[in-house]
Amino acid sequence: MDKEQVTLTIDGKTVTVPKGMVAVDAAKTVDIDIPVFCYHEKLGPFGCCRMCLVEVEKMPKLATACTLNVSQDMVIKTDTPKVKKGRNGVLEFTLLNHPLDCPVCDKGGECPLQDNTFEHGPDLTRMEYNRAHHDKATPLSPVITIDRERCIACQRCTRYSDIIEKDTALVMLNRGFHNEVGTFNNEPYDTRFSGNVVDICPVGALTNTQYRFKSRNWDLKNAESLCAHCACNCNIVIGTRQNRFMRVQAKSSENSVSNDFVDDGWICDKGRFGYQFLESKNRILDPRENGIGDSRAGVIETAKKVAASFKKIAEEHGPDSVGFLGSPFGTNEELYLYQKLFRLGLGTNNIDHKLYADSPGLPVDHYDMEDVESADLVLTIASDPTEELPILDLRLKKAVSSLGTKLAVLSDQQTLMDCFACHSLRYNVGSDGTVLQSLTDGLGKKGFKKNKGFETETGIESDAFKELIASLKKSTKVCVIYNPEKLTGDSVHILKSFLTALDKNSEGTCGAIPAAPATNALGAMDMGVLPDYYPGGIPVSNAAKIRELWGDSAPVTEGASASELIQKAESGELKALWIYRCNPLVDFPGGAKLEQALKKLDLLVVHDMLETETTRIAKVVLPSNGPGYDEGTTTNIGGRVQFRKRGIVTQNPADWKILGAMLKELDIESDYRDSFEVTSEIASTVPGYSEVNRKNLRKFGHQREKVSNPKVPESKGSSEKAPDKNALRLRVSNYLFAHDKILDASSSLAHHFQTSSIYIHEDDAKSLGLSSGAEVTIKSDWGEIKAEVQVNNRCNPGGALVPYISDEQGVASLLNPDGGPTWVTFKN
Amino acid sequence: MKLFLTHNIDTKDLHSIKVYKKQGGYGSLEKAFAKKPDEIVQMVKDSGLRGRGGAGFPTGLKWSFLAKDVFPRYLACNADESEPGTCKDRVLLQKNPHLLIEGMILCAYACQIETAYIYLRGEFYDLAEIMDKALEEAYEAGYLGANILGSGMNLEMYTHLGAGAYICGEESALLNSLEGMRGEPRLKPPFPAVEGLYGKPTVVNNVETLCAVVPIMNEGPEAYAAVGTEKSKGTKLVSVSGHVKKPGNYEIPMGLPTRDLIYDLAGGIRDDNELKAWIPGGSSVPMLPASLVDTPYDYEAIAAAGSMLGSGALIVMDHTTNVVEEALRLAGFYMHESCGKCTPCREGTRWLHQILSDIHLKKGKESNIALLEDICDNMSFKCFCPLGDAAVAPVISSIQNFREDYEELLNLAKAGTAS
């Protein structure tokens, strides 16, 4: 639907734009810059700063261009004496009580107030009275400091808090000359997205506490890069000075142009403030052999030596005696080369990167993040955007509150999105398979009938479920967002049948976003870091296709999955394991047994950027540069492939270089001169990535073609009863600011760290005799951890929610290593 | 003189429904319900009634601007009477609350509204009690609630107390405040008639305006229009304050010479002093010199004289006054009441006050007058809402009409007689 176009004149230039566009934006299209403070394209018109005065023919008064909707034949003038006098006057008022401490202001040099004053303002002040004084540095939170003297009350920040964050945490207090930005009761402004106000503040009032007085911004080197904290892959600008990290900003209209396909110009606080790990003492900088010390040979030489050792073991014990445990944190190039090394160099499909069941590809369209805005119904399944993919949280709120999108939340836990949802259904922990099967059936001919058995098993009321099915059927565009990591058993396969059924039975179009939270979770699947799929979703069973693309030596039998690799290490079948950017000792179930299994290996190599529990027991440790230092592409949840530029220069070789050397060592041709050459190879060998090239990666990245997967594996289904009546089924949920290797104790986000808790339903609390605040030991068949009970009904009776709040918490030690259900009991 | 609003205002216990009904109260409803809503709107148009809150916009026209077929609609009665010098709504609320309720029912019927609010300024807590009591009586008598007098019309009516902010008398700030948000004006368009309270079409009318609908209904639009001038119809309740012998509220036919208002009704200037200056319509309008005292008191004539009828608050100053003092007092008021949303008003009102304080304390400089004029020019029509323009009016008009008062203080400053 094209909006009606209108033609008007601005300063004699003819402009044709959609009707109703504000004059500021219309002027921009013909490179006429109308100065603004309060107007921000993502916040909409407000009109309080009065900076953007323009003259409009047939209007007696000057108009504010940011609130002026253009209409046909309008004649706007931005350069008349009347306009000049008006703007000059407004700037004099704006500066009247501004401290003019530009020499010591962080904003200096990139300050709209400076720029507008330079261009439109008075050169002298007529103000002869003392300027207003406030404290120069008031902390709004541990990461944001406000200098109220500099504030020009444009209300961008408070409107951001209201319109974008949707929680009005930041507000204007008091009245008139005394108004100021603050919070109710002076509570800290410490939301998940608070840092964006620093970017949008048009003066130096809201400052980044870490960056205060660290650098003049013209001394910064700015690199447009990607955030690597989650799978949104938000666009950021990394500012460095003398090769040291200074700050992270969102890439937005303030410094460049926002990538609306991904982040809409916003980033979360973890992305902005959580970068201390880049300069952490825990960084691995040199290769080493544990017990022997740092290797003098250098990274490349050491890597080549280890690759040769792997080759030797594979030759001696067969290719399946070696294995690769990757991670969804590497770039596509790194992951691609690793699978190539193991498949072609060592001849094994013992490659994996995850513990949950899923297969590459979707039976329906793969939607980009932006599609959330044009969908009329978004259904989230087992996904918790706020904690897992925060920018998706903002996107959903925007879609729901201003674009008419309806939200349906289907989950086993209460999330912060529930209050924006029109359908909010909570199923019993572990009943997702039944729910998804009933949803699939309900969409089909069978339909869904009120059903006591269903209600008991899932905890969902039949009527509410029926309404959801009806909504799904009649919507014109449905976007399903699911987190495969939080589906139990193999119900992700049922989910894909559901998507097929939805595509068939809904009146409109539909698509899905697989929303696993790890940085390059989708890329890892696409790059075939899987025991049963080659890159681009080609199953190992498709020998013909594999031979065509990868040559005759490519292995075509299914390899061992991540958990099987551990089992094989324990049984002795696996002799050598290569672990890349993964810390199984903390993240995998198994606890002490797991450590013993890994210690049995003849050769354990860990290639990582930070020291972990696992690097401590590895035989050889290799340094990986990681985000900030590395370059390469990642694929976000929307299938958008973007290029991650480095912010800082390091002497250590890039991972692709290390991998190139190892491939060469194993006689595989590899003369990559830069990461783009690996990207080109991906484009030529990975279906779906053929259009991924340097040109397409510029600016907004490129949405790779959907990995099609018509055949969905059958679900084996599982429904398990509690072993004893006092046992609850465990569900580990995510917490954005978990205290892990990335957000360590030195992090400026440490104020967000939480203590170990367990959330249970009041019914269970009653029958178990537990109450909020009780300190308990949670026990499973595999381990135990300590936690404080919170009775808050965030899950249905029978479930126990434990948020992952730190590595030390040890929650993975509770989990069932088979991937089956985990039942927990309590000990006071 | 024909009076429409205050002819029986001094009747004992008029605020009780019993006495009010004895006086013919609520009699207009039956007549109204016999007509179609649109006919009532037409009657109000025909009467020539204009908004008595300050802007003087034709009331019937305002009602007809409501977005078509969008429901629910709301009525908000603006009882945030805060303009310095204005106290005319107070007397209606205090003494004749049922007249307002009756007027609001008529408006609600004409505009198909089922929810109405009376937004009272925070300081009117005593009047809120009176209004609440009256509402209770009206509900009991079946004039409010479901199916009023069997007409099928439903109307719920509530009082709402503000928190003491002049800006909330501006209609969109009033709506913000009513919704529980900061009392700051909203962007227009959309106007309240299209997107008002909770984003729905809303009528915002002043107390006096709504009260005037009752006599229009009872006596017919012709009878109302017969009083007044060609374009300013009916009567106006004027609050006369300042240096007069009998300050108070007077209902006058539109077009009465201001001289009659000051010298006859208000008893003339105190101590029989000489009239120096008068502000015709509350603090927001330019002041006029004594020479214009024969100006008829109606919208057009006052506008032609260079001011505005505003809310109908006549402030009288005698020859003992130095108008700089008046300008300073009002500048202080606007500085205090500026909501701070837009830059020119927030900063300008304070700066004006700083300069006027200096002049008043005989510490001013000759260049101050030109500076004041330029600040006023930089504020005029460049602020977000009319409050900024209002703040300028007393300053600029006092300089224009009484420059000698400024010069006198500046000369004293030059002579070094700072006090």
Image (spheres, coloured by chain):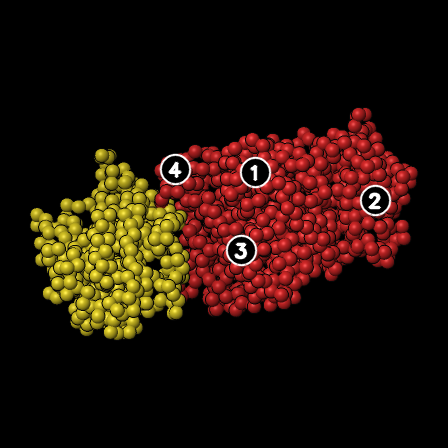
Q: Chain of mark 1?
A: A
**Residue at x-position 27% and y-position 52%:** B120
Q: Where, by quadrant of the figure, is residue B50 drawn? A: bottom left
Task: State the CA–CA distance, disc 2 to disc 3.
Answer: 49 Å
The answer to whether any part of residue A407 appears in the image is no
Looking at the image, the residue that sits furthest to the front is A724
Q: Amino acid at mark 3?
A: Glu
Q: Amino acid at mark 4?
A: Ala
The answer to whether any part of residue A570 appears in the image is yes
Q: Chain of mark 3?
A: A
Q: Is residue A1 above or below residue A304?
A: below
Counting other residues with Cα less than 10 Å from the Cα at mark 3, is it few (<14), some (14-19), or many (20 or more)? Answer: some
Q: Between disc 3 and disc 4, whose residue precedes?
A: 4
Q: Evaluate whether label 3 is on the same chain as label 4.
A: yes
Task: State the CA–CA distance, disc 3 to disc 4.
Answer: 60 Å
Apparent colour of chain B: yellow
Q: Amino acid at mark 1?
A: Ile
Foreground pick, A103 / A805: A805
* Numbered disc in front, either 2 or 1: 1
Q: Amino acid at mark 2?
A: Phe
The residue where tag 4 is placed is A132
Foreground pick, A553 / A127: A553
The residue where tag 2 is placed is A342
Q: Between disc 2 and disc 1, whose residue precedes?
A: 2
- Could you tell me if the residues under marks 2 and 3 are in contact, i.e. CB atoms within 8 Å? no
Q: Is residue A451 above or below residue B350?
A: below
* Numbered disc in front, either 2 or 3: 3
**Residue at x-position 28% and y-position 66%:** B147
Can you tell which mark lies on residue A305?
A: none
Q: Chain of mark 4?
A: A
**Residue at x-position 19% and y-position 45%:** B322
* Numbered disc 1: secondary structure: strand
